[in-house]
């Protein structure tokens, strides 16, 4: 049955400024193409959500702690649906934020990739900021006893995401999440390395996870990307140690033999020895 909370949550989004590409979106800096996506994705998302509501494809369902929404397609992709965690049902703002996140997934591939998840979370966080800065009552904080997986946890997580977004580090939050790390591929890492503040803006944990994937898919083939990440590592020794035993010897062997990267490999080796000596 169509739920009026869902209707109101979609209306709330329809009246927001981010839905029409304004508000907090104008504060974003960085890659122009990427910002354009945020400016143009709100309205189709609203249309999709309204269509899903009209066809009764949105419902509340119990979910494991830490999951706020989900969805999929049943019967050979004929029946797409979105689910929102029952624990958020009493909180209109939380329902609205979750619907927008899931709606963008449905507009896109629907697969749980790091790139799509960053897109969903970025837009959702911009919408969250708009509501928060307007002084919209984030009711969960005031009227509900804190329960695990309830609105309190939801808003805590959104503050964390808002701070991460300010530093260009939402991607690190996503890469750290075991649900999405499986979608990392060497090709994708190479293509996106300059996004979100570049290689030096990635956390050490992200750099380690990237290097593992790059080594697995071919140190020789992805030497350019590996060198860039190693050059941007704040503590080279820590990162190298975390990647695994076979990584460094293999990198040195391949890097020294490559005429384009031999000099940069030698410089990295010096840096690596130097920081080892300082211990
Ligand atoms: Zn998601």
Image (cartoon, rainbow, N blue to C red):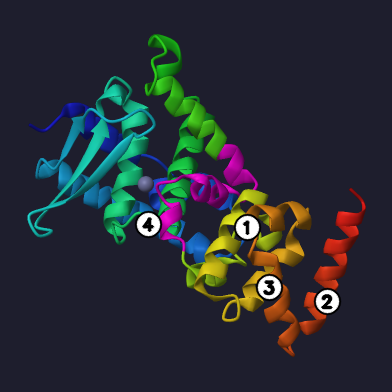
Q: Quadrant of residue 223?
A: bottom right
Q: Is 5 above or below relative to 187?
A: above
Who is closer to the viewer here, 117 or 227? 227
- Residue 245: horizontal and vertical position, in percent? 65, 59
Does residue 177 appear in the picture of this structure?
A: yes
Which residue: 63% across, 72% down?
225
Q: Is 273 above or below relative to 95?
A: below
> Which of the marked residues, 1 or 4, is nearer the chain's N terminus?
4
Residue 251 circle label: 3
- Element on which disc 3 rests: helix
Which residue: 20% across, 30% down?
61
Who is closer to the viewer here, 15 or 131? 131
Tell me the residue that label 2 is attached to: 266
- Element on which disc 4 rests: helix
Q: Nearer the viewer, mark 4 or mark 3?
A: 3
Residue 41 circle label: 4
Could you tell whether 230 is left or right of 209 in the image? right
**Mark 2 crowd level (few <14, some 14–19, many ≥20, 10 Å Cα):** some
Name the dominant secondary structure of the magenta segment.
helix
Q: How far apart in space, not on screen, are marks 1 and 4 (Cα)? A: 40 Å
Residue stretch in magenta: 162-184
Q: How far apart in space, not on screen, are marks 2 and 1 (Cα)? A: 20 Å
- Element on which disc 1 rests: loop
Residue 50 is inside the magenta segment: no
> Which of the marked residues, 3 or 2, is nearer the chain's N terminus?
3
Q: How far apart in space, not on screen, are marks 2 and 4 (Cα)? A: 46 Å
Q: Nearer the viewer, mark 2 or mark 1?
A: 1
The answer to whether the beta carbon of the residue marked 4 is less than 8 Å from any atom of ligand 1 is no
């Amino acid at each position: 049955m169509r739920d009026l909370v869902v209707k109101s949550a979609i209306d709330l989004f329809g009246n927001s400024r981010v839905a029409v590409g304004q508000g907090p979106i104008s504060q974003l800096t960085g890659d122009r193409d990427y910002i354009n996506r945020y400016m143009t994705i709100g309205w189709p998302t609203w249309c999709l959500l309204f269509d899903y509501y009209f066809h009764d494809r949105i419902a509340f369902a119990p979910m494991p702690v830490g999951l706020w929404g989900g969805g999929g397609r049943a019967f050979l992709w004929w029946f797409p649906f979105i689910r929102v965690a029952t624990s958020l049902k009493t909180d209109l703002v939380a329902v609205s934020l979750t619907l927008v996140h899931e709606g963008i997934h449905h507009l896109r591939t629907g697969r749980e990739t790091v790139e799509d998840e960053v897109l969903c979370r970025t837009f959702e966080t911009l919408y969250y900021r708009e509501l928060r800065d307007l002084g919209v009552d984030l009711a969960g904080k005031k009227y509900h006893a804190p329960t695990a997986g309830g609105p309190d946890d939801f808003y805590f997580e959104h503050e964390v995401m808002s701070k991460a977004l300010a530093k260009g580090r939402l991607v690190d939050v996503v890469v750290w999440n075991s649900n999405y790390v499986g979608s990392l591929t060497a090709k994708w890492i190479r293509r996106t390395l300059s996004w979100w503040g570049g290689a030096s803006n990635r956390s050490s944990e992200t750099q380690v996870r990237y290097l593992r994937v790059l080594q697995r898919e071919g140190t020789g083939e992805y030497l350019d990307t590996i060198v860039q990440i190693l050059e941007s590592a704040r503590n080279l020794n820590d990162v190298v140690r975390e990647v695994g035993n076979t990584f460094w010897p293999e990198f040195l062997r391949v890097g020294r033999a490559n005429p384009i990267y031999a000099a940069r490999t030698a410089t990295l080796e010096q840096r690596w020895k130097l920081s080892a000596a300082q211990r």
